[in-house]
Image (spheres, grey):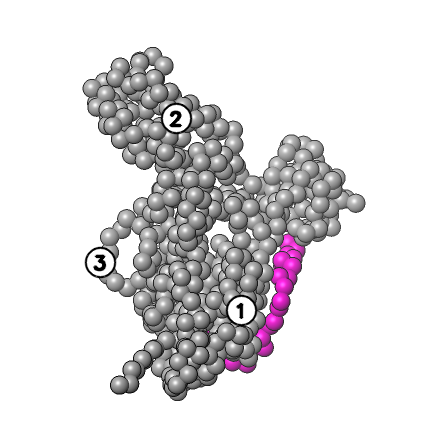
Amino acid sequence: MRENICVVGDDAQSIYGFRGANIQNILNFKNDYPEQRLIRLEQNYRSTKTIVNAANSVIDHNKDQIKKKVWSDKEEGELITVLRATSDNEEGTLVANSIFGYKMLRQLNNKDFAILYRTNSQSRSLEEALRKQDIRYRIYGGLSFYDRKEVKDLLAYFRVVINPHDEQALLRIINYPARGIGKTTIERLMVVADERKQAIWDVIASDEEPMPKDFNSGTVSKLRNFTTMIKSFQTLLNKQNAIELAKHICNTVGIIKDLKEDDTPEGLSRVQNIEELLNAIMEFSDKQVDEVTGEQNEVTLNKFMEDVALLTDQDKKNDEDDDYVTLMTIHSAKGLEFPYVYIVGLEENLFPGIQSLSTREDLEEERRLFYVALTRAETKLVLSYAESRYRWGNLTLSEPSRFIEEIDQSLIERTRKASFRGTSSFDEGINFSNPFSKSFQTRRDVTPVTSNTTKEFQKRTSQPSNATPINTPKNNYSDFVAATPDEIDEGMRVLHQKFGQGTVMKVEGIGPNKKATVLFDECGSKQLMLKFAKLNILK
């Protein structure tokens, strides 16, 4: 009697090692069954030749694989576009602009597009950019950023600090993280509040009226500790800016500590969502700039929460139409296909992730994940990366992913460095700042640009202004030339066309978000965003 075994699989798409899947089960099959016969299924029926060849050139870098040469008999197809942004926020803008442009010029639907990312937390900047373009989207197999539990939990703390009578938010956080205030206590508080015709906050925070008599001393102590903590946050509302207060609340209440106790991939994702919320606050703060003077406007937590309320109100719109741009993680995309695919966040330590760089095996699984992402596209593939990205509310430089360089460079067209204003154009390619431009077409004669390291941020020189400076002798500004942000350093004497002369006291940040605190002789201390400030260095 002869026993037969048939196994079907693609080693190039083995991407679930974190769940216990082992690629060696496929690779060692020929050793376990010496009489086996290998049949390679090498034809790709989905993608253009360009996309297939790009995927082949990437996966060839893996050592642990069953060698094969996938091919397609479809058309050659368009070159793979690489978008380069100055920040993750701008990356979202470029992607949204690109989708809008393709939709208009090629008469496409939202459902023709998919945006793939390595981690769920990356969806936030993309969602906001799509909203601004009025492009409908959905999160495949998940929730929109501001609907995720951990995000709503921290936002609930912010809401209670701003308005402690927000009972929905109060009940959400009164025992999270767990502080021994159980369900029975909460139910009793609701009854007492109703009897006294008071808000729950007034019952637990009042110094004039006693706590319910049936509460023991331990329960009373826990409730007092909670209200004392919230009141301490309230005293800082007008003393600290949004990001400072948000970080303080986050660290004090222990949300991060609680989430980190779950060391599963899902737990890590929740921590990343909290990080991204802090990044959102920092980005929002950096946008609040007078673009004439460069002065940084102070942003309170109240103002940020007003902005969030506007964003989340848009999410409540109920539309039965199924025409949506799909946003998903690459793991969720396995087995799916879309005409136009965007793979975002292609930066070292993000994709490939920093945790995958310790061993060759882990890096190869990340490369297989990238292979899966590439092969989701049928017609057009767009890759993007940011030269800087917020981490826990701090801006850090990023390097382009090694995976971009592993693609056959003859298959790639790249953008020039994106402008600080959120627009970008190809090297003689598509101009997404004006999607109706005649240049909105694919060019196969674009010379690829290669880079292994992050280049310096684009230096910009502003034109002289006609504004009259304050109490400044004419000979100091008659030949006014604005310095680039990189030229400004602490201790310098500078001239501003509105605020006059001053001394640079502090310089912080990097790239497009570099800012300086300047003590002006006439009008005191000002915090300026250097890309707008137009400072002249005095000799």
Question: What's the residue type where badge 1 is placed?
Answer: Phe
First in sequence: mark 2 or mark 3?
2
In the image, residue 453 lies at what x, y percent? 63, 64
Which sits in the foreground, 139 or 38?
Answer: 38
Disc 2 and disc 3: Cα gap in Å? 43 Å
Label 2 CA crowd tier, 10 Å (few <14, some 14–19, many 20+): some
Residues drawn in magenta: 441-465
Q: Residue at x 45, y 44 (%)?
A: 260
Q: Residue at x 64, y 34 (%)?
A: 525
Q: Which mark is residue 210?
A: none
Q: Residue at x 73, y 50 (%)?
A: 479
Q: Which of the 4 image quadrants contains residue 76?
A: bottom left
Residue, disc 1: 403
In the image, residue 512 lies at what x, y percent? 58, 52
Q: Is residue 224 left or right of residue 529?
A: left
Residue, disc 2: 226
Which sits in the foreground, 390 or 32?
Answer: 32
Question: What's the residue type where badge 3 is placed?
Answer: Glu
User: What quarter of the picture does the N terminus occupy?
Assistant: bottom left
Q: Is residue 429 above or below residue 186?
A: below
Q: Secondary structure beneath disc 1?
A: helix
Q: Is residue 215 above or below residue 186?
A: above
Q: Is residue 464 left or right of residue 332?
A: right
Residue, disc 3: 320
- Disc tally is 3
Q: Is residue 462 magenta?
A: yes
